[in-house]
Image: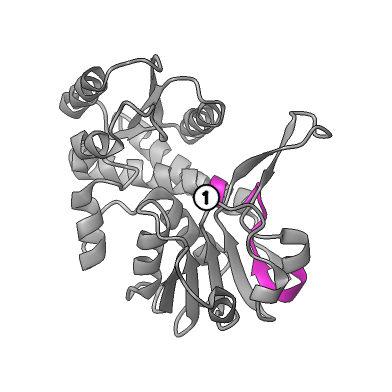
Amino acid sequence: MLVLDGKLAAAAVKENLKAETAELVKKGLPTPHLAAILVGNNGASETYVASKVKNCEETGFQSTLIRLAADTDEATLLQTIESLNQNPDIDGILVQLPLPKHISEEKVIKTIDPSKDVDGFHPSNIGKLVQGLPTFIPATPYGILLLLAHYQIATKGKHAVVIGRSNIVGRPMSILLSSNIPQGNCTVTLCHSHTPNLKEICLQADIIVAALGKPEFVTPDMVKDGAVVIDVGITRVDDATAKKGFRIKGDVLYDAVAPKCSAITPVPGGVGLMTIAGLLKNTLQAYQNNRG
């Protein structure tokens, strides 16, 4: 059983990006610049944004973190995004989700300039993804593709089952795995909360991507021997015995499922780290598109 270590794969991606950034510096050119907006002080969001800023620094990118109070009105956030859209020194923009309930995530995503949408959520970029046109791939699905490539996991002709239909992970992942790309050419079944016979469908899968946000949902009786399991889930579960008072759990019951797999991602240490790698690659691509 192969553990698909996101730390190792992400480090390899970042080393390549660091080398490309160093070449820009040698030529006296500016480096890619990512701007992140954080609204409120959600603990998980704070952690994610801090990690993104740290990874930018490690890669040689510039980063700007804009903090807004939790009670910031929608108009102010949209104006902040528009100012970044107009700033030629900013290559990539991300707004950390989730947002406070009084702000429309749809409006926010649509306001980001598609050419700076390094999260890959803008409808324009999703449309291009569906059509197989060059675009920014949503960061988590992109990270999964990079992970599969790093470990040379064969996908051509395989049956992939994606559990979860979110616009951030499940839907784009199903499109990418079915696309004519190196880590694609799968036959894909997209499952969700209303899918009957989910267990039977999963048992047919050569590759399972679990992205439904329910801790330890995928159990050994849902996985055939030799399957590749990609766990996208990352949920904080209260645990008084843990130092921080909680533990991070994925959508897969790891210890029980892992022995049946040919390869599996751990949580933490798997897809989450690759998501940031995908984000950084998108940021460099935005730089090359807009300033290259």
Image quadrant assignment for residue 169 = bottom left
**In the image: residue 275, left or right of residue 129:** right
**In the image: residue 132, left or right of residue 163:** left
Observer-nearest residue: 291 or 94?
94
Residue 198 lies in the magenta stretch = no
> Residue 260: image x %, image y %?
73, 75
Residue receiving disc 1: 274
Coloration of the structure image = one colour
Residue 168 sits above or below residue 27 on the image: below
- Which quadrant does the N terminus fall into? bottom right
Number of callouts in the render? 1
**As shown in the figure, which amino acid type bears the numbered disc 1?**
Met
- Which quadrant does the C terminus fall into? top left
| Image point (26%, 61%), residue name | 129
Residue 157 sits above or below residue 283 on the image: below
Residue found farthest to the left? 86
Asked if residue 134 can be seen in this view, the reply is no
Residue 198 sits above or below residue 36 on the image: below
What range of the chain is rendered magenta?
258-273
**In the image: residue 208, left or right of residue 179:** right
Other residues around mark 1 within 10 Å, as few (<14) / some (14–19) / many (≥20): many
**In the image: residue 76, left or right of residue 213:** left
Image quadrant assignment for residue 62 = top left
Image quadrant assignment for residue 20 = top left
> Residue 142: image x %, image y %?
42, 56
| Image point (52%, 29%), residue name | 54
| Image point (63%, 77%), residue name | 227
Residue 271 lies in the magenta stretch = yes
Asked if residue 77 can be seen in this view, the reply is yes
Task: Indicate the secondary structure of the residue bearing disc 1.
Answer: helix
> Residue 258: image x %, image y %?
73, 67
> Residue 257: image x %, image y %?
72, 67
